[in-house]
Amino acid sequence: MSQDKNTLMDKLEKVPDDKIDNVNRFLDTVIENKSNESPFKLSAPIESMSLGGDPLERSKAASILSKMIKEDIQPPFTIGIYGRWGSGKTIFLDLLRQALDSNAFHIIPFNAWQYESTGNITYSLFKRIVLDPPLKEKKKYQNTLGRAVFKIGACWAEKRHGVDIKKTGILESLGKFGKHFQDILDESFNDVSTLKDKFKECVTEVLSSSKKSTMIVFIDDLDRCNPENVVNMLESLKNFFFTPNCIFIISADREVVTSGIRQKYHGSEFISGDEYLDKIVNLSFELFLDPKIGLKNIINQYKTTYGSLLGNHKIDFLVDAFELTKSGSLRKARRILDRFVLLKKHLDENNGSLDKDVLFFTIILQELMPQLFADTKKFSNNKILDKIPSCTAPGTNIQYEKISEYERIKYRYALDPFSKDLIQRFKTIQYPGPNPNSNEISENVSASIKFIESLTI
């Protein structure tokens, strides 16, 4: 027979905060393979040069979904936002958060990939939910929930990692307070339903303290995590986190997630990645992408924001480059533009004499066509970049083993219309006139490569 829950919590309330911290840090070492981070400290989010806004024109879709959440969806509920990497899922989540009323919902963003190194993103999500609320009496609030973290964390350590906290010596190190923790561990809550009840108590405490009726948790970049973590998170959403007053919104590449599910259950003919996912996600949306529209809008954003810095430089060439290379990742487009802005600023501040448009072209090569970039660097003395457009296919009697590596590379590009076309289009833009290919860019590109590699950006 377990002791009365209120009595047990009263006992834990008598334990000093530093003792609670010590035990929870120890649980971290078991569950998250970490030894120096308190569960009461949340890592700062990764900053980026994101310009915000709505480059993909999805504000209307976000508004419609937010209205559904406010008026039609009854928690507990899980929503899936699917799309390829770089298709703008994170931007859409930002728009959706803005469309939702923060006065009515307790909104918690969680980037699963940032916690991948902890070894247990599910436990990290639990701590993120209950230990980082924006409350005025934050210290007092966190200490109360810190005790709940101990109860759930101890069970998690045993269920997931086979570690019995009672046999580790940590409780003995707490002296007279160890008995209070021992009583909590003796309480029977090792089954999933009781764990779920404990989490429900935490959510109730969070919502009561924040004076909100519903908690909405945004889980981003789940598809970047390893399959084991992905499946554990999905299982926990269904069996542990699926509790009243909670809505979870997951953004991921559906194919990557279902592939991870198949990998986790490799060999089981009864497991379908799609069916598995559909049993957990109640409602899903696919973000289809027209790269050209999104790319043009992003370029216009950069022109507006960095107008004086970008001047008349030919950044619209990025549309041609994306079309030729079949790239659809707008995240990569932002990275190219961000790098150009930073490098251009550095050049301007140091009176650099590089051709800025060629520098932009070089960044495109490095990001979208890394093999062509590598060959350009390796054969810079041969000016291969200028010779590729005129390369012709080898004859049928060619003996490859007797020709140089440089000649073999030239023949390879003779059969690569995309590289030829990319170089020719850039030259046409860079050198308008009757014969743009008569102008050489190899030396300027080589100079840009040296400049890029001289900096750590």
Image: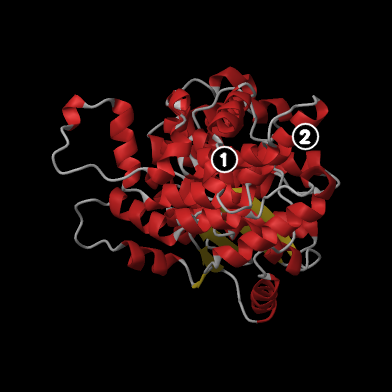
Q: Is residue 2 visible?
A: no
Tag 2: amino acid: Lys
Marks 2/1: CA–CA distance: 27 Å
Query: Residue at left 61%, top 67%?
Result: 293
Q: How many marks?
A: 2
Q: Position of residue 177 (x, y in %)?
A: 64, 26
Q: Residue at x 60, y 26 (%)?
A: 447
Q: Is residue 79 left or right of residue 369?
A: right
Residue at the bottom extreme, as displayed: 72
Q: Residue at x 55, y 28 (%)?
A: 446
Numbered disc 2: secondary structure: helix
Point out the frontmost of discs 2 and 1: 1
Whole-percent x, y for residue 346 in the image: 76, 29
| Badge 2 density bin: few <14, some 14–19, many ≥20, Cα 10 Å | some
Query: For this rendering, which residue is in front, 131 or 396?
Result: 396
Left or right: 54 in relation to 398: right
Tell me: residue 226, above or below residue 379: below
The disc, 2 or 1, on the residue closer to the chain's N-terminal end is 2
Would you place residue 349 above or below residue 358 in this image? above
Asked if residue 362 shows in the view, the reply is yes
Quarter assignment of residue 345: top right
Q: Which mark is residue 276?
A: none
Question: Could you say whether the residue bearing mark 1 is in a helix, strand or loop?
Answer: loop
Q: Tell me if residue 144 comes above or below residue 204 in the rendering.
A: above
| Residue underneath mark 2 | 345
Q: Is residue 123 above or below residue 330?
A: above
Q: Amino acid at mark 1?
A: Asn
Q: Which mark is residue 439?
A: 1
- Badge 2 vs badge 1, beta-carbon distance below 8 Å: no
- Quadrant position of the C terminus in the picture: top right
